[in-house]
Amino acid sequence: MFKLYTSDGYAFVNYSETADYEISWTLNDRKLGDTWRVPNVTTVYENEEDRRFASYKTSDSLGMGQCIFSQKAVDILGTALEPHGELLPLNNANGPECYLFLANKIDALDLDRSDVKYFPSAPSRIMAIRKHVFLEDAIGGCLAFRLNGGPMVNFFTKPVADLVSQSDLAGFSFQLLWEST
């Protein structure tokens, strides 16, 4: 099981309108379809060297591990990931991009064997996971998902990581969280 990060040297995307930051926090476990209002976003670079390589990027981040894909990444990964959520369009002057929203939430964390920290004010709500152990039967054929009751983190299986490594996509870094035994 993997967590996706944006590689060093790749840009971040910010909402152009302050009010749009609430969009990410109001998403739940249902697909939005035609109700999605396409927000304007701008690409933010850490330095001029990052700006020079912007035309090669295929993965950005909208903070908190939320994945933003270029059209090239959508073309390669979209068919595999769309059954598990939606690729929601974003309006960026640098070119078309999509926000990967995984609506697929499952109870796949083995709470007895994982190291989990809960919110003191809501003891059944997971604040952080220090060690991940997943339930293989709960994952089944899922390629990508989020956890019920957990932080808004996207989890990806090995076939997705393999698809990225076999393509010429740039900007993706996968952190291995757990391997089945």
Image (cartoon, helix red, strand yellow):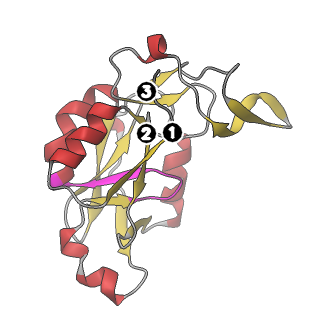
Number of numbered discs present? 3
Give the residue drawn at x 15%, y 54%.
72
* Residue 81 relative to residue 76: left or right: right
At label 3, the amino acid type is Arg
Q: Is mark 2 on a helix, strand or loop?
A: strand
Figure check: 47 above or below 149: below
Instruction: List the residue tagged with mark 1.
Output: 177
- Highlighted range, magenta: 61-72
Give the residue drawn at x 45%, y 23%.
180
Instruction: List the residue tagged with mark 2.
Output: 2
Q: Nearer the viewer, residue 114 or 68?
A: 114
User: Quarter of the image containing the N terminus?
Assistant: top left
* Residue 78 relative to residue 1: left or right: left
Q: Where is residue 158 in the image (x, y as percent from the top left)?
A: 33, 33
Image depth: mark 2 or mark 3 in front:
2
Give the residue drawn at x 41%, y 59%.
61
Q: Is mark 1 on a helix, strand or loop?
A: loop
* Residue 101 relative to residue 18: left or right: left
Q: Nearer the viewer, residue 35 or 107?
A: 107
Callout 3 crowding tier (Cα within 10 Å): few <14, some 14–19, many ≥20: few
Give the residue drawn at x 54%, y 53%.
64
**Is residue 34 visible to the viewer in this orientation of the structure?**
no
Q: Where is residue 83 in the image (x, y as percent from the top left)?
A: 27, 25
Instruction: List the residue tagged with mark 3.
Output: 30
Q: Does the magenta stretch include residue 65?
A: yes
At label 1, the amino acid type is Leu
